[in-house]
């Protein structure tokens, strides 16, 4: 139904119709811009954030990369001082990007950046693939957990947000689906055989708690008197189960601690990080916006 390369984490050349509104006049002028990447910082590849700085050659850099550059442009090595790119800043403000699920009927549009990414994470019209083994069902995020509950409920491990639960992960099967007892949210506990041990990570499949900003998790593995723990405030959102080893956010259990077991018992706790708390913190950091 949808393209595998569309996972939220993937970066590729994005060509989405973007609307640029200019309401200064009585007439509303609207244009389109096709290369969304033009609004990404060439250094960190994240959406540009104001103030946007430029070197003497006009290369742009975002507000978070700028202080790390020590006045030297990474593209041309010339000076990058405190010269702002007003045109890029205006462009950023004027652009509204439709949700990536517009083709499925989502009407939402946001400025390019975090707000858009946050919406896309919880957008009901995001297409996901059922994480159950040998099931090829794809559905909107909104419908996938209902499908899972109806068809595969017996094969998953249940948890309650905020509480520790035992999860029995079969190393050969590599995947254990976790489902929240109340809101039926789906997570996938996965393991990969790495060079230094077994890599274990929890990925987010469907998101059903709109008042929660991010999900984090804690993992504990016990072996004799040894305890291996892992804590993170970030969970990767996936569109389908992949068997590629994670690059970030994973726990490593050294092979000696597995005792050649084929099933390992992990204690897992999912934490919901509240949206309002995050926003309060953000406000403290916000600088006053500078007017032209
Ligand atoms: Zn940057
Ligand atoms: Zn430059
Ligand atoms: Zn949407
Ligand atoms: Zn299924």
Image (tube, rainbow, N blue to C red):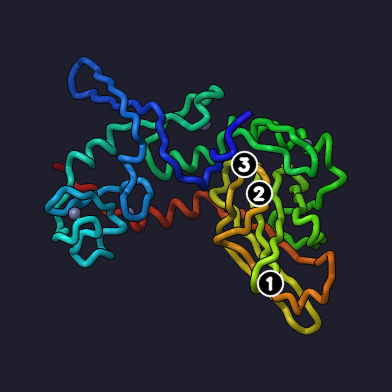
Of the pair 156 and 172, the residue shown nearer to us:
172
Disc 2 versus disc 3: nearer the observer? 2
Residue 143 image point, x, y percent:
70, 31
Of the pair 94 and 6, the residue shown nearer to us:
6
Q: Which residue bears the numbered disc 3?
A: 239
Residue 113 image point, x, y percent:
39, 43
Identify the mark nearer the N-term, 2 or 1: 1
Give the residue displayed 68% in from the left and 63% down from the top: 200
> Residue 220 occupies which quadrant of the picture?
bottom right
Q: Quadrant of the N terminus?
A: top right
Disc marking residue 197: 1
Dot 1: what SS? Answer: loop
Q: Quadrant of the C terminus?
A: top left
Q: Which residue bears the numbered disc 2?
A: 242
Dot 2: what SS? Answer: loop
Measured in 3D between alpha carbons, the distance from the residue under mark 2 to the one under mark 3, in whole angstroms, is 9 Å
Q: Residues within 10 Å of mark 2 (few under 14, many from 20)?
A: few
Residue 2 image point, x, y percent:
60, 31
Give the residue displayed 18% in from the left and 64% down from the top: 71
């Amino acid at each position: 139904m949808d393209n595998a390369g569309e996972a939220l984490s993937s970066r590729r050349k994005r060509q989405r119709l973007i609307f640029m509104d200019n309401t200064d006049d009585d007439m509303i002028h609207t244009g389109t811009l096709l290369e969304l990447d033009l609004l990404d910082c060439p250094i960190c590849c994240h959406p540009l954030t104001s103030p946007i700085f430029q070197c003497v050659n006009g290369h742009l850099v975002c507000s978070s990369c700028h202080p790390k550059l020590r006045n030297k442009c990474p593209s041309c090595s010339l000076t990058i001082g405190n010269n702002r790119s007003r045109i890029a800043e205006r462009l950023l403000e004027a652009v509204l990007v439709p949700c990536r699920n517009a083709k499925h009927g989502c009407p939402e549009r946001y400025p390019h950046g975090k707000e858009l990414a946050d919406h896309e994470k919880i957008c009901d019209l995001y297409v996901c693939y059922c994480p159950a083994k040998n099931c090829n069902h794809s559905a909107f995020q909104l419908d996938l957990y209902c499908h899972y509950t109806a068809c595969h409920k017996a094969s998953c491990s249940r948890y309650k947000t905020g509480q520790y639960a035992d999860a029995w992960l079969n190393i050969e099967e590599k995947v254990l689906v976790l489902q929240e007892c109340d809101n039926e949210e789906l997570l996938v506990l996965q393991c990969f055989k790495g060079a230094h041990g077994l890599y274990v990570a929890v990925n987010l499949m469907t998101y059903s708690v709109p008042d929660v900003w991010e999900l984090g998790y804690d993992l504990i593995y016990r072996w004799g008197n040894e305890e291996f723990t892992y804590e993170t405030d970030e969970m990767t959102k996936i569109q389908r189960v992949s068997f590629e080893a994670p690059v970030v956010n994973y726990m490593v259990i050294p092979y000696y601690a597995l005792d050649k077991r084929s099933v390992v018992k992990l204690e897992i706790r999912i934490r919901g990080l509240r949206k309002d708390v995050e926003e309060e913190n953000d406000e403290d950091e916000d600088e006053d916006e500078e007017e032209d």
